[in-house]
Amino acid sequence: MRAYLAVIKDSFREAFASKILWVLIIMIAGFLVLLAGFSVKPAMRTGIDSGDVVDMESLAIRMREAEADSPAGRIRGRFPNELQDKLKAFRPDTADRRTKSELYGGLRRQLAEQIRELSFATETRVPVESLSEEAKTLAGQEATLEEDRQLRLNRLVLEAALPEDVHASPSEVVNVTYIGFVLFEDITLSQDELEKGINGLLQVFIFLFVSVIGTLIAIVVTAPIVPRMFEAGAIDLLLSKPVSRSILFLSKFFGGCAFTLVNAAFLILGMWVILGLRLGVWSNGLLLSIPIYLFLFVLYYSISAATGVVYRGPIISVVMVVIFWFLCFVVGTAKEWIEGAEIRPSTVYTIIPAGEDILAVNTLGRVHAWSEPSGTWEMVFTQNQQQRQMPAFVEVSMRMQAGFPFLGTRYDKKTQRLVTLTKSIPFPLPGNGTSRLFVGRAEDDWARRGGTRASANPRALLLSPESEILAVGPQGLQVFTGDPEKTETSRKWMGLDFTMGKGAGRFVDATPADLPRWKRPFDATMDATTGNIIIFNAGEILLLTPKTTDGKTAYVAGPTRKLDTDEAALLAVAGNRLLVALADGEYRLLNATTLEPTGTSIPRGPEKPRQAIGSPDGRFLAVVSHKSEAWLLDTTTGQAVSNGVLSGDVHALAFNDDSHLLVGDIYMRVTGYSLPDFQRLSRHDPSLTTLQAVYRYGVLPVYTVFPKPGELNAVITRLFEEDNTVAIGGNANDLRADQFEIDIKTPLISNAAFLLVVLVLTCFYVARKDF
């Protein structure tokens, strides 16, 4: 054992004797000194930028249509005449990109200028009950406020005047400084924003400077260590003692990691201390990245060491490491490219039983109907001509930024039409705009009709038992009136209504007057039997009951129930059972009418649910998670239903009118099963395309057996994230938004297995070779 420890000690001694090590340590120390210049100072958020506006199009429409004597109307009245004229003439459907950009930019600049005027809060005259507690406190001291506090009050008044369009700002923020000087006066950050920003920068730093440049330098520096061990004289001296050749090699191998360990520990520990003391950000992810980076180096170093044993040359060792990296890069890139271009777009995201037909929506939002004669899916419900002309790579890029385009897709059996509501996409992303309602019918070949805009930012689409279309979100409840296949064009100005095409279709507010604005996390569902709307907002369940008077339906507040949780949730109703699927996997079963617990203990479900549904016969509840895990509950027994059908990658579930289960997965395959025996009743399985076949039978098997050093960056990403999924919009509490799982298990196991194989083979070679 002493001989092996001597080899390891000698490796550390050799590392510390290296001039390159001390040069790097001096460079790292200089970097840490420069980093220590950053600090923060308390500030107040007074301005407004593009990130503070929920949606510019919605804001422009609301400012255009506001009553002259409302707070929003009074703000508009302060605008220059030119901007007011542009607002009056603005029509989102016909305005081109340049017109929108100019109007949105001018509107934001004017709002920023207005809230810098000290008289803004007084002249806007927002009702006191609409103000936040911070705003009420400042308003009570308005006569004696200093200028910065008056500007803070102006910002809070703007938020109260436009609560649906301007994000609420945090009361405690900071400015980033360097050696005492504020870097950006107009940029203020809350502690949470500061931590997220720094963690994002740290991920980039770890990937680029540590994982790439640091690993390359370490490989070049350590490449001669193993070949030098097998030089004539050195190997003879070592083998003259009664030692194991394999253990001797492993001692030299792990001792060679000393160079990397010293540099990585000095850099990352130094950054961790400085960021904690100077910025108040103690990043545990930064500390935990040390062993991950060391593991990445060891993986590459195993190739270098194995080559050094065989060829006994440091140059060929470095070359082989580069070749190894290139092969891994090619295989990984090929897999990612094919998945992005073909596999993800051909994955079922939503299944819609539509009478005798089955519609399947892929991850790009393309709706398909099954054609029995050809045995393939045919695209229906196509988008407008402008969107169809978008190049494929632009559309894929848009979906990667905006996510799945629909907030809801429902089939109305009574009117026999497909009803969809698109999500709001912020400007300037392609396809930007507010939520819009579209419908289609089977006899019309599912052609897309309508396009009415929702006046708020809804989060869910609901259909009542009387075929009433509702859009619901934190801003409130909207009911659609008129013909959804046509569009009503609003023409309001200065409180006067010049609306064209009345009777066509529009959304009108139906939120109960006595209810406060709902909070996030948010979800909503409809009890198809009673017509009750059930709302989840910030850990509280609320029941809205329909009341019909003179042919008009209004919703009144019913019972509420607090769940004592901060988790987001999805809701689903089956019979008289309400499933509350919490993001942490704790599922609860309540009475759908009284909101009282049923007394039935149900098993945990998958974390991060994406879809929750109930069967028409009221017996089953089903959930699909963002990790493609499926969960099925039999409400009669309170037990989860297990079957191999649900154990694989399941991307979508649905129940048809007969309560048969429809299961969707990759390659646009949809299979129908009877319950609870899971007898297969139908299968819609199109033939593989050429690219899909290449992926399934070629790229995927090669990728599976290949090591994945590049995927270790995903492990580092996970260290800086609170959840094991990443949301496209950055809001992990929005369970209906696309979220991608950060897979840390696969790269760790795959790379560890490869490392073990390389070291075992090298040890076998060393033990058998006559040096």
Image (cartoon, grey):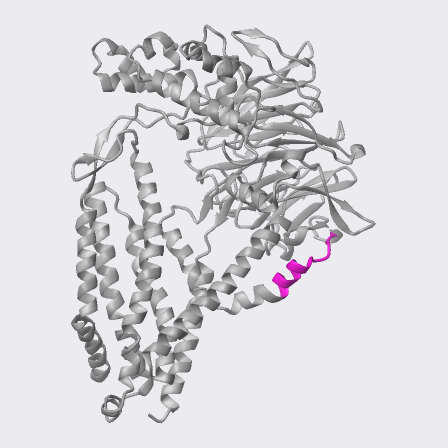
Q: What stretch is highlighted in magenta?
A: 684-697
Q: Say whether residue 602 is left or right of residue 255.
A: right
Residue 163 as seen in the image, left or right of residue 488? left
The answer to whether residue 419 is magenta is no
Q: Looking at this view, is 662 or 178 the one in front? A: 178
Question: In which image quadrant can residue 577 be found?
Answer: top right
Residue 284 percent location from the top left of the image: 29, 50
Q: In this view, does 252 lie above or below 752?
A: below
Between 731 and 394, which is closer to the camera in this rendering?
394
Q: Which of 268 and 408 is in front in this view?
A: 268
Q: Residue 201's x, y, as percent?
A: 33, 47
Residue 597: horizontal and vertical position, in percent?
A: 52, 34
Residue drawn where x is 41% and y is 69% of the image: 752
Identify the residue at horizontal 33%, vertical 81% (top origin). 313
- Residue 688 magenta-drawn? yes
Pick the front one: 155 or 609: 155
